[in-house]
Amino acid sequence: MIKKMFLAVFAIGIFATACSNDDDNTPTTASLTLNLDGLEALGDDYVYEGWIIVDGAPVSTGVFTSVTFPQSFTVDATQLANATTFVLSIEPAIDTDPDPADTKILAGDFSGNSASVDSNGIVANFGNAAGTYILATPTDADDTNEASGVWFLDNSSGSPMVGLTLPTLSAGWKYEGWAVIDGMPVSTGTFTSVSGFDDNASTSPYKGDAGNGPAFPGEDYLQNAPSGLAFPTDLKGTTIVISVEPSPDDSVAPFTLKPLAHVVPTDAMNHTAIAMGTGPVTMLSGTVTR
Protein backbone atom coordinates (compact mmCIF):
# COMPACT_ATOMS: atom_id res chain seq x y z
CA MET A 1 0.00 0.00 0.00
CA ILE A 2 2.82 2.40 0.86
CA LYS A 3 4.49 1.55 -2.42
CA LYS A 4 1.32 2.38 -4.39
CA MET A 5 0.95 5.73 -2.60
CA PHE A 6 4.58 6.58 -3.34
CA LEU A 7 4.13 5.78 -7.02
CA ALA A 8 0.99 7.94 -7.18
CA VAL A 9 2.72 10.90 -5.56
CA PHE A 10 5.69 10.43 -7.87
CA ALA A 11 3.41 10.42 -10.93
CA ILE A 12 1.68 13.62 -9.80
CA GLY A 13 5.08 15.23 -9.36
CA ILE A 14 6.10 14.29 -12.89
CA PHE A 15 2.81 15.70 -14.27
CA ALA A 16 3.22 18.96 -12.36
CA THR A 17 6.80 19.27 -13.54
CA ALA A 18 5.73 18.65 -17.12
CA CYS A 19 3.03 21.34 -16.88
CA SER A 20 5.52 23.73 -15.33
CA ASN A 21 7.97 23.07 -18.15
CA ASP A 22 5.22 23.70 -20.71
CA ASP A 23 4.46 27.06 -19.06
CA ASP A 24 8.16 27.94 -19.03
CA ASN A 25 8.31 27.33 -22.79
CA THR A 26 5.58 29.86 -23.53
CA PRO A 27 7.23 32.84 -25.32
CA THR A 28 7.27 36.01 -23.23
CA THR A 29 8.17 38.29 -26.14
CA ALA A 30 6.93 38.69 -29.68
CA SER A 31 7.92 40.61 -32.80
CA LEU A 32 6.23 43.76 -34.09
CA THR A 33 7.12 44.72 -37.66
CA LEU A 34 6.69 48.19 -39.15
CA ASN A 35 6.49 48.76 -42.90
CA LEU A 36 5.87 52.49 -43.32
CA ASP A 37 5.88 54.76 -46.38
CA GLY A 38 6.94 58.37 -46.71
CA LEU A 39 8.70 59.05 -43.42
CA GLU A 40 11.75 61.28 -43.57
CA ALA A 41 14.73 61.44 -41.22
CA LEU A 42 14.31 63.83 -38.30
CA GLY A 43 16.79 66.32 -36.90
CA ASP A 44 19.35 65.14 -34.35
CA ASP A 45 17.18 66.15 -31.41
CA TYR A 46 14.19 63.91 -32.25
CA VAL A 47 13.32 60.25 -32.81
CA TYR A 48 10.30 58.25 -33.89
CA GLU A 49 8.65 56.09 -31.22
CA GLY A 50 6.05 53.37 -31.67
CA TRP A 51 3.26 52.68 -29.18
CA ILE A 52 0.64 49.99 -28.75
CA ILE A 53 -2.56 50.80 -26.89
CA VAL A 54 -3.30 48.10 -24.31
CA ASP A 55 -6.38 48.43 -22.11
CA GLY A 56 -6.53 52.08 -23.08
CA ALA A 57 -2.93 52.85 -22.04
CA PRO A 58 0.10 53.46 -24.31
CA VAL A 59 3.01 50.99 -24.16
CA SER A 60 6.23 51.89 -25.99
CA THR A 61 7.45 49.47 -28.65
CA GLY A 62 10.79 51.24 -29.07
CA VAL A 63 12.40 54.22 -30.81
CA PHE A 64 14.13 54.51 -34.16
CA THR A 65 15.78 57.08 -36.44
CA SER A 66 16.26 55.09 -39.65
CA VAL A 67 13.43 55.45 -42.18
CA THR A 68 14.35 52.29 -44.07
CA PHE A 69 11.68 49.61 -43.67
CA PRO A 70 10.66 46.99 -42.71
CA GLN A 71 11.88 47.25 -39.12
CA SER A 72 11.05 44.82 -36.30
CA PHE A 73 10.88 45.36 -32.55
CA THR A 74 10.70 42.89 -29.66
CA VAL A 75 7.82 43.58 -27.28
CA ASP A 76 5.93 41.83 -24.50
CA ALA A 77 3.91 39.00 -26.08
CA THR A 78 0.85 39.35 -23.87
CA GLN A 79 0.66 43.10 -24.28
CA LEU A 80 1.06 42.81 -28.03
CA ALA A 81 -1.66 40.17 -28.27
CA ASN A 82 -4.02 42.45 -26.32
CA ALA A 83 -3.16 45.64 -28.20
CA THR A 84 -6.02 47.36 -30.02
CA THR A 85 -4.18 50.22 -31.77
CA PHE A 86 -0.74 51.23 -33.01
CA VAL A 87 0.45 54.85 -32.83
CA LEU A 88 3.67 56.46 -34.06
CA SER A 89 4.88 59.69 -32.47
CA ILE A 90 7.84 62.04 -32.73
CA GLU A 91 9.70 62.35 -29.43
CA PRO A 92 12.70 64.26 -28.06
CA ALA A 93 15.87 62.17 -28.36
CA ILE A 94 16.40 62.80 -24.65
CA ASP A 95 12.93 62.28 -23.22
CA THR A 96 11.97 62.25 -19.53
CA ASP A 97 8.23 61.96 -20.23
CA PRO A 98 7.06 58.32 -20.33
CA ASP A 99 3.90 59.23 -22.27
CA PRO A 100 3.59 59.89 -26.03
CA ALA A 101 4.17 63.47 -27.17
CA ASP A 102 1.42 65.46 -28.86
CA THR A 103 3.25 65.01 -32.15
CA LYS A 104 1.57 61.80 -33.26
CA ILE A 105 2.00 61.09 -36.96
CA LEU A 106 0.47 57.67 -37.75
CA ALA A 107 -2.25 55.56 -36.13
CA GLY A 108 -4.50 52.61 -36.90
CA ASP A 109 -6.46 49.83 -35.21
CA PHE A 110 -5.42 46.18 -35.30
CA SER A 111 -7.58 43.79 -37.28
CA GLY A 112 -6.29 40.32 -36.51
CA ASN A 113 -2.51 40.45 -36.69
CA SER A 114 -2.14 43.63 -38.72
CA ALA A 115 -3.00 47.31 -38.57
CA SER A 116 -3.25 49.72 -41.48
CA VAL A 117 -1.93 53.05 -40.24
CA ASP A 118 -2.06 56.53 -41.76
CA SER A 119 -1.78 60.21 -40.90
CA ASN A 120 -5.31 61.24 -41.85
CA GLY A 121 -6.98 60.76 -38.52
CA ILE A 122 -4.04 61.61 -36.30
CA VAL A 123 -2.60 64.76 -38.02
CA ALA A 124 -5.40 65.95 -40.35
CA ASN A 125 -7.14 64.97 -43.57
CA PHE A 126 -5.97 67.13 -46.49
CA GLY A 127 -8.41 65.80 -49.08
CA ASN A 128 -10.09 69.21 -49.43
CA ALA A 129 -6.97 71.39 -49.10
CA ALA A 130 -6.76 74.33 -51.50
CA GLY A 131 -4.85 77.57 -51.69
CA THR A 132 -4.42 80.93 -53.38
CA TYR A 133 -1.51 83.34 -53.17
CA ILE A 134 -0.32 86.61 -54.66
CA LEU A 135 3.10 88.04 -55.48
CA ALA A 136 3.62 91.33 -53.65
CA THR A 137 6.05 93.05 -51.26
CA PRO A 138 3.87 95.07 -48.87
CA THR A 139 6.55 95.41 -46.17
CA ASP A 140 8.55 98.04 -48.02
CA ALA A 141 7.81 101.24 -49.94
CA ASP A 142 9.45 100.08 -53.18
CA ASP A 143 7.08 98.98 -55.93
CA THR A 144 9.85 97.75 -58.27
CA ASN A 145 10.39 94.39 -56.50
CA GLU A 146 6.82 93.08 -56.16
CA ALA A 147 7.75 89.60 -57.45
CA SER A 148 10.00 89.09 -54.42
CA GLY A 149 7.19 88.38 -51.93
CA VAL A 150 4.47 85.75 -51.58
CA TRP A 151 1.31 86.13 -49.50
CA PHE A 152 -1.31 83.44 -48.97
CA LEU A 153 -4.42 85.52 -49.56
CA ASP A 154 -7.08 85.95 -52.24
CA ASN A 155 -7.67 89.48 -53.52
CA SER A 156 -9.82 88.54 -56.52
CA SER A 157 -12.85 90.21 -54.90
CA GLY A 158 -11.00 93.51 -54.63
CA SER A 159 -10.24 93.06 -50.92
CA PRO A 160 -7.78 90.70 -49.21
CA MET A 161 -9.52 87.50 -48.11
CA VAL A 162 -8.37 84.17 -46.69
CA GLY A 163 -6.40 82.34 -49.35
CA LEU A 164 -5.92 78.92 -47.77
CA THR A 165 -8.45 76.16 -47.20
CA LEU A 166 -6.76 73.89 -44.68
CA PRO A 167 -8.02 71.69 -41.84
CA THR A 168 -7.25 72.43 -38.22
CA LEU A 169 -4.17 70.44 -37.23
CA SER A 170 -3.93 68.16 -34.22
CA ALA A 171 -1.85 69.34 -31.27
CA GLY A 172 1.88 69.15 -31.95
CA TRP A 173 1.72 70.35 -35.58
CA LYS A 174 1.95 73.64 -37.49
CA TYR A 175 1.74 74.75 -41.10
CA GLU A 176 4.74 76.38 -42.76
CA GLY A 177 5.01 78.21 -46.07
CA TRP A 178 8.04 77.94 -48.34
CA ALA A 179 9.48 79.40 -51.51
CA VAL A 180 12.01 77.10 -53.18
CA ILE A 181 14.49 79.61 -54.57
CA ASP A 182 17.30 78.23 -56.76
CA GLY A 183 16.69 74.84 -55.18
CA MET A 184 16.82 76.19 -51.61
CA PRO A 185 13.61 76.13 -49.54
CA VAL A 186 13.23 79.41 -47.64
CA SER A 187 10.48 79.65 -45.04
CA THR A 188 7.69 82.21 -45.12
CA GLY A 189 6.92 81.39 -41.47
CA THR A 190 4.84 78.95 -39.45
CA PHE A 191 1.15 79.32 -38.62
CA THR A 192 -1.85 77.44 -37.26
CA SER A 193 -4.57 79.80 -38.53
CA VAL A 194 -5.10 80.69 -42.19
CA SER A 195 -6.22 84.19 -41.14
CA GLY A 196 -4.07 86.51 -39.10
CA PHE A 197 -0.32 87.04 -39.00
CA ASP A 198 2.00 84.06 -39.06
CA ASP A 199 4.40 83.39 -36.19
CA ASN A 200 7.33 85.45 -37.50
CA ALA A 201 5.41 88.43 -38.89
CA SER A 202 7.19 90.91 -36.65
CA THR A 203 10.55 89.12 -36.40
CA SER A 204 11.27 87.96 -39.96
CA PRO A 205 14.82 88.83 -41.04
CA TYR A 206 13.73 88.98 -44.69
CA LYS A 207 10.87 91.48 -44.68
CA GLY A 208 11.17 95.17 -45.43
CA ASP A 209 11.29 97.99 -42.91
CA ALA A 210 7.92 99.62 -43.66
CA GLY A 211 5.72 97.20 -41.70
CA ASN A 212 4.68 93.60 -41.14
CA GLY A 213 2.44 93.23 -44.18
CA PRO A 214 -1.21 92.09 -44.26
CA ALA A 215 -2.70 89.87 -41.56
CA PHE A 216 -2.21 86.65 -43.50
CA PRO A 217 0.64 84.13 -43.74
CA GLY A 218 3.34 85.28 -46.13
CA GLU A 219 6.79 86.75 -46.55
CA ASP A 220 8.77 89.40 -48.40
CA TYR A 221 12.27 88.33 -49.42
CA LEU A 222 13.94 91.72 -49.43
CA GLN A 223 17.05 91.58 -47.23
CA ASN A 224 19.36 89.31 -45.21
CA ALA A 225 19.26 86.51 -47.78
CA PRO A 226 20.57 83.07 -46.73
CA SER A 227 24.06 82.23 -47.95
CA GLY A 228 24.00 81.46 -51.66
CA LEU A 229 20.96 83.62 -52.44
CA ALA A 230 20.47 87.32 -53.17
CA PHE A 231 17.42 89.40 -52.16
CA PRO A 232 15.32 90.96 -53.61
CA THR A 233 14.61 88.11 -56.00
CA ASP A 234 12.01 87.06 -58.56
CA LEU A 235 9.72 84.26 -57.42
CA LYS A 236 8.36 83.58 -60.90
CA GLY A 237 9.37 80.05 -61.88
CA THR A 238 9.98 79.02 -58.26
CA THR A 239 7.88 76.51 -56.30
CA ILE A 240 5.61 77.68 -53.50
CA VAL A 241 4.82 75.03 -50.86
CA ILE A 242 2.68 74.61 -47.76
CA SER A 243 4.07 71.90 -45.47
CA VAL A 244 2.96 70.43 -42.15
CA GLU A 245 5.69 70.59 -39.54
CA PRO A 246 6.17 68.97 -36.13
CA SER A 247 6.19 71.51 -33.33
CA PRO A 248 8.75 71.86 -31.93
CA ASP A 249 10.95 71.27 -34.97
CA ASP A 250 14.74 71.31 -35.16
CA SER A 251 15.04 70.95 -38.95
CA VAL A 252 15.40 73.92 -41.31
CA ALA A 253 14.01 71.86 -44.21
CA PRO A 254 10.32 71.20 -45.02
CA PHE A 255 8.85 68.08 -43.40
CA THR A 256 7.55 65.21 -45.50
CA LEU A 257 3.86 66.23 -45.40
CA LYS A 258 3.26 68.84 -48.13
CA PRO A 259 -0.47 69.19 -48.89
CA LEU A 260 -0.16 72.17 -51.26
CA ALA A 261 2.42 73.19 -53.87
CA HIS A 262 2.59 75.23 -57.06
CA VAL A 263 5.19 76.40 -59.56
CA VAL A 264 4.73 80.14 -60.04
CA PRO A 265 4.07 80.79 -63.74
CA THR A 266 6.88 82.72 -65.42
CA ASP A 267 4.26 85.13 -66.76
CA ALA A 268 2.44 85.54 -63.44
CA MET A 269 1.01 88.98 -62.76
CA ASN A 270 1.95 90.73 -59.55
CA HIS A 271 -0.91 91.43 -57.10
CA THR A 272 -3.07 88.83 -58.89
CA ALA A 273 -4.58 85.73 -57.23
CA ILE A 274 -2.87 82.49 -58.26
CA ALA A 275 -4.37 79.09 -57.40
CA MET A 276 -2.21 76.40 -55.80
CA GLY A 277 -2.36 72.69 -56.59
CA THR A 278 -2.20 69.49 -54.59
CA GLY A 279 1.20 68.94 -52.98
CA PRO A 280 3.45 65.91 -53.45
CA VAL A 281 2.64 64.27 -50.08
CA THR A 282 -0.84 64.61 -48.59
CA MET A 283 -0.86 61.45 -46.46
CA LEU A 284 1.57 59.01 -44.83
CA SER A 285 0.63 55.36 -44.48
CA GLY A 286 1.91 51.89 -43.77
CA THR A 287 1.27 48.48 -42.24
CA VAL A 288 2.08 47.14 -38.78
CA THR A 289 2.06 43.36 -38.19
CA ARG A 290 2.33 41.30 -35.01
Image (tube, helix red, strand yellow):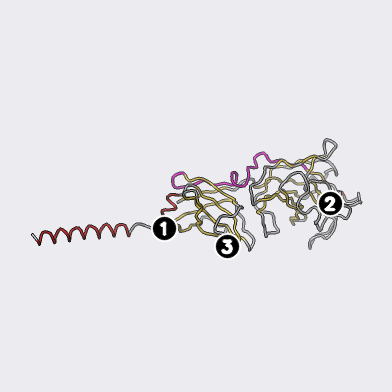
For marks 2 and 3, the one nearer the N-term is 3
Mark 1 nearby-residue class (10 Å; few <14, some 14–19, many ≥20)? some
User: Percent from the top left, x then y, of residue 3?
Assistant: 10, 62
- Secondary structure, mark 1, is strand
The furthest residue to the top: 157
User: Percent from the top left, x then y, of residue 52?
Assistant: 50, 52
Task: Identify which residue, 132 or 58, lies in the foreground.
Answer: 58
Task: Identify which residue, 162 or 171, lies in the foreground.
Answer: 171
**Residue at figure coordinates x 81%, y 44% from the top left:** 134
Task: Read off the magenta span.
Answer: 111-132
- Secondary structure, mark 2, is loop
Side of 195 relative to 98 (left or right)? right
Q: Quadrant of the N terminus?
A: bottom left
User: Percent from the top left, x then y, of residue 276?
Assistant: 74, 42
Residue that carries the numbered disc 2 in the rendered image: 212
Residue type, numbered disc 3: Thr
Image quarter for residue 275? top right
* Dot label at residue 29: 1
User: In this rendering, which labeled residue sits more in front, label 2 or label 3?
Assistant: 3
User: In this rendering, which labeled residue sits more in front, label 3 or label 1?
Assistant: 3
User: In this rendering, which labeled residue sits more in front, label 2 or label 1?
Assistant: 2
**Residue at figure coordinates x 82%, y 43% from the top left:** 268
**Residue at figure coordinates x 70%, y 49% from the top left:** 175
User: Percent from the top left, x then y, of residue 2?
Assistant: 9, 61
For marks 2 and 1, the one nearer the N-term is 1
Q: CA distance from mark 3 to mark 1?
A: 25 Å
Residue type, numbered disc 1: Thr
Residue type, numbered disc 2: Asn
Residue that carries the numbered disc 3 in the rendered image: 96
4 to 281, vertically: above or below: below
